[in-house]
Every structure is written in C-alpha cells, then in structure tokens.
Image (cartoon, rainbow, N blue to C red):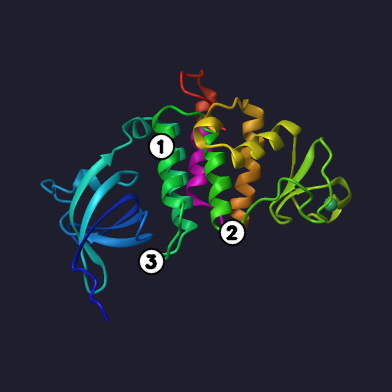
C-alpha cells in the first residue's frame, strides 16, 4: 500500500467555518481535485494568525495541508481571489453565500464531484465582475444537472410528449416542464411563461458569460428563482438556510431605489 504524502498542496474555495476551542476553526473547503473536505486551522482566530484572512468563507485560496489523524491541518494559506466586491455588497454577498451553501449541500466529503468547483468559481467570478443576479439560476440549473437531477426542458417530463410554445407548468416533483394534458397529475409547480422557458434552455446551453448578458426583468427573475428554488429544495429534501436571508436582502433592496448593479432575481 502506498503512503499518501504527509503534506500536500491544493486550491479551493472556503465554504464554511466553525470554531472550536479557544482559537481554532474547522473549515469546509471545496477543491477541484480533492473534492470537499474539512480541515482544521490551529490558532487562526488569534489576531496574529497569518492564515486568518486567507481562510475566510467565500475566499479562493492556495492551501498547504498536513495529514492529521482525524482532520488534516492547514499549514499555509494564500488568497487567490478575495471577492471584495461581493463581500462589500449586501445583495451580492447573500447570493454568493447561497451558492456556497448549495455547493456544500449538494456534495459529499472525499468524493469526486467534477465540475462543482469550477461552477462555483465561475459564479463567484461573475458576481465579482458585476454580473446580474440571474447568474445564480445558471448555477442552480447546472448544479442540479451535475448532481444527477437534470430538469427536463425539451419535452414533457411525464409523458415525453411535445410541449406547446405557451405558458407551461414547471414541477420539481415531475422533474421539469409538464404538458397541458399531464398537468393534473404533476403535483405542485409554477407556471413558466415562454420567455422563462427560453431563459432556462439558454442557461443549459450557453456559457456563464453569455448567460449573464441575457436580459431578465424583475418579474421573470422572480418566477425563475421560485422554480429553481423549488427544484433545489425538492432534491435536498429540506430548506436552504441562507435562502430566507437572501429573500430578505432581496426584499430590502427592492424597497430602496435601484443602484448601478443589476437587480436581484
Ligand atoms: Zn405530458
């Protein structure tokens, strides 16, 4: 049996922190090669810790770790991207926290999750660059797909029949769009206008930059956020804790005059 190296390097996005003891914290990290794992940073809550700023949640960092008996231990950390614009903006940070929570919930530790790291990095980069909030729909749709929960957007999810170009039910329980004839047996869902169907199909086919350039008005953004939120909750089989925070931030931001950056949902 070959020994794993005692010390290794990786890069990842910090998803979550929980504090233990006087000054230590355990961080959950999502990486490209090692998947998701937890590791401990000793003394990281002391003011003098050199790793402190490089292990904040929502930071993309270069990491060095030593294998530990139970948890690996961070020995070095260096920020690649701090996502300052995201952090300094209430709406953008709420969106990013929501995406990080989903990336965490939809992955399991020590398992290969190809694509999730790149997807999260992509949405964080886009939010940092000032992309509109609907890029989060792209993230949700592709995260569902990477997790084996593709939404059926081409034909009826129940009968496989053709979909008319009209307002159509989208149901998490049915697994996607549902034709008029099957609607009664589809469980709960939301009616998606033709424009919304087009946006979702575009999100599936386009890259994130192209999708960010699509114009999504506030009402449609709300419907799409609801439909994808339903699918996320259905597959997680529970509420996403940051989604109520995100909804509150969104509500507050609507109550004040629009600023330069795109609307939230
Ligand atoms: Zn049908």
Q: Residues within 10 Å of mark 3 (few under 14, many from 20)?
A: few
Residue drawn at (54%, 54%) of the image: 146
First in sequence: mark 3 vs mark 2:
3
Q: Secondary structure at mark 1?
A: helix
What range is drawn magenta here?
Answer: 237-250
Q: Residues within 10 Å of mark 1 (few under 14, many from 20)?
A: many
Q: How many marks?
A: 3
Q: Which mark, by number, is residue 148?
A: 2
Q: CA distance from mark 3 to mark 2?
A: 18 Å
First in sequence: mark 1 vs mark 2:
1
Residue 183 left/right relative to 116: right
Is the Cβ of the residue at disc 1 closer than 8 Å to that at disc 2?
no
Kindly report which numbered mark, 1 or 2, lies closer to the viewer in this rendering: 2
Q: CA distance from mark 1 to mark 2?
A: 27 Å
Is 141 located above or below residue 113 in the figure? above
Residue drawn at (21%, 43%) of the image: 53
Residue on which disc 1 sits: 93
Q: Which mark, by number, is residue 110?
A: 3
Residue furthest out toward the left: 48
Q: Secondary structure at mark 2?
A: loop
Magenta stretch containing residue 249, yes or no?
yes
């Amino acid at each position: 049996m070959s020994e794993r190296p005692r010390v290794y390097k990786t890069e990842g996005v910090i998803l979550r922190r929980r504090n233990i003891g006087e000054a230590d914290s355990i961080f959950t990290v999502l990486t490209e090669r090692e998947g998701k794992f937890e590791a401990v940073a000793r003394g990281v809550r002391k003011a003098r810790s050199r790793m402190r700023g490089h292990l904040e949640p929502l930071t993309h960092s270069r990491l060095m770790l030593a294998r530990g008996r139970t948890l690996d231990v961070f020995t070095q950390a260096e920020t690649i991207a701090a996502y300052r614009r995201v952090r300094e903006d209430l709406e953008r940070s709420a969106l990013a926290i929501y995406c990080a929570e989903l990336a965490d919930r939809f992955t399991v530790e020590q398992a290969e999750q190809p694509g999730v790291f790149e997807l999260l990095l992509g949405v964080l980069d886009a939010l940092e660059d000032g992309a509109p909030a609907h890029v989060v729909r792209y993230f949700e749709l592709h995260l569902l797909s990477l997790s084996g929960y593709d939404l059926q957007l081409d034909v009826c999810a129940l009968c496989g029949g053709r979909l008319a170009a009209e307002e159509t039910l989208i149901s998490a329980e049915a697994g996607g769009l549902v034709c008029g004839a099957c609607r009664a047996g589809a469980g709960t869902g939301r009616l998606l206008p033709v424009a919304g169907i087009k946006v979702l199909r575009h999100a599936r086919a386009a890259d994130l930059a192209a999708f960010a350039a699509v114009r999504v008005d506030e009402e449609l953004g709300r419907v799409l956020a609801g439909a994808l939120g339903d699918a996320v909750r259905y597959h997680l089989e529970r509420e996403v804790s940051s989604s109520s925070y995100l909804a509150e931030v969104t509500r507050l931001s609507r109550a004040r005059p629009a600023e330069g950056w795109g609307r939230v949902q």
